[in-house]
Image: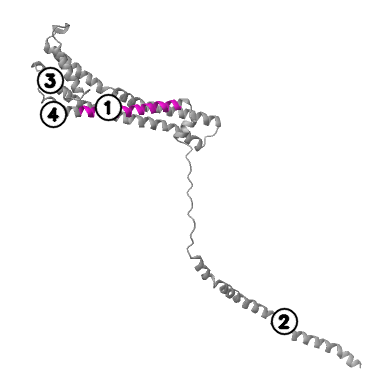
Amino acid sequence: MSFLNSMRTPFAAALLALATVAAMPTTAQAQASAPAADAAAAPAAPAASDASATPAPAAADTSAVPSVTPAASKETIENPYGLGALWRDGGWIAKFNLVIMLIMSMGSWYIIFTKFWEQHKMLQSAQGVGEGFWTAGSVKAGANTLDDGSAFRYIAESGLKASEHHEGTLVEQIDRHTWIAMSVSRAVENIQSRLSDGLAFLATVGSTAPFVGLFGTVWGIYGALTQIGIAGQASIDKVAGPVGEALIMTAIGLAVAVPAVMGYNWLVRRNKTVMEKVRAFSGDLHNVLLAGKR
């Protein structure tokens, strides 16, 4: 019994060691199977992701269908600076300056159109002189063929009056030739003076309108800089707007001056053409009256 008791303890220890060794492969296999399971799960995840990504082209196809969207409305921004703002916000000096340039412009266009019409009528009367006056039997009969109020009829009647009322008056001390020449020449000068009416206004407007507009610009810039200095802000919107409004004055001055200058030069050239015909008619009339034909 003592021998069995002494052998029981080593035998139990050997059995425990054998059981431990037998259990170690199972644990190693379990530990080795875990990485294998992870490695198998890793390819499965991309496969699952590929499977989930397979319907994507169908979604892309549906998104490729063109959709009709309403056109975006264009927003119009009203210009806060301009002629209206200049008249509304400008002082009495700016408004007075604009009124002066408006009067200049209206006067210039009125003179241009009226003088053109007057010259046109005189050129038509010059054609009628050759068709009716010089084919008449006398100066008086020829004068009756001319239009009432025309320059050529006025010259003819002035020459007739000088020829008929020379004797028996204070002017009889002047010879008849000189008296008729003086009367006809005076009539021609009156016609030339009437044609030149208004041209001085055009010349004045053409030479002064740019400076009137420049005065408005200088005054507007002065007012804008004063307001900026009071406000203490020199941003671009505080400077560009008022200065741009002031520069409108210069543009208006040029718009008034340019038509006046061009109209003046054009009318002067046409006056020269008309007066050549008038002087030619007066010279021929003078010779006819001196010949004694009335």
Q: What residue lies at 80% left-to-right and 86% top-to-bottom?
A: 16
> What distance separates the C-alpha of mark 3 from that of mark 2?
151 Å
User: Viewer-proximal residue, 205 or 250?
Assistant: 205
Name the quadrant containing residue 207.
Answer: top left
| Residue marked by disc 4 | 131
Name the amino acid, label 3: Val
Q: Position of residue 276 (x, y in %)?
A: 17, 25
Task: Please tell me whether mark 4 sits on a helix, a strand or a loop.
Answer: helix
The residue that disc 3 covers is: 139
Helix, strand or loop at mark 2: helix
Q: Which residues are magenta?
A: 94-123
The part of the image, by quadrant, that contains residue 95 is: top left
The answer for how far apart the CA atoms under marks 4 and 1 are is: 25 Å
Horizontal side of 189 relative to 52 (left or right) equals left
Amino acid at the residue labelled 4:
Glu
Between circles 4 and 2, the one closer to the viewer is 4
Secondary structure mostly seen in magenta is helix
Rendered residue at 67%/80% (across/down): 33
The residue nearer to you, when weighing 246 against 278, is: 278
Q: CA distance from mark 2 to mark 1?
A: 124 Å
Vertical relation: 226 (above or below) 12: above
Answer left or right for 270 relative to 103: left
The answer to which of marks 4 and 2 sits earlier in the sequence is 2
Say if the magenta span includes residue 119.
Answer: yes
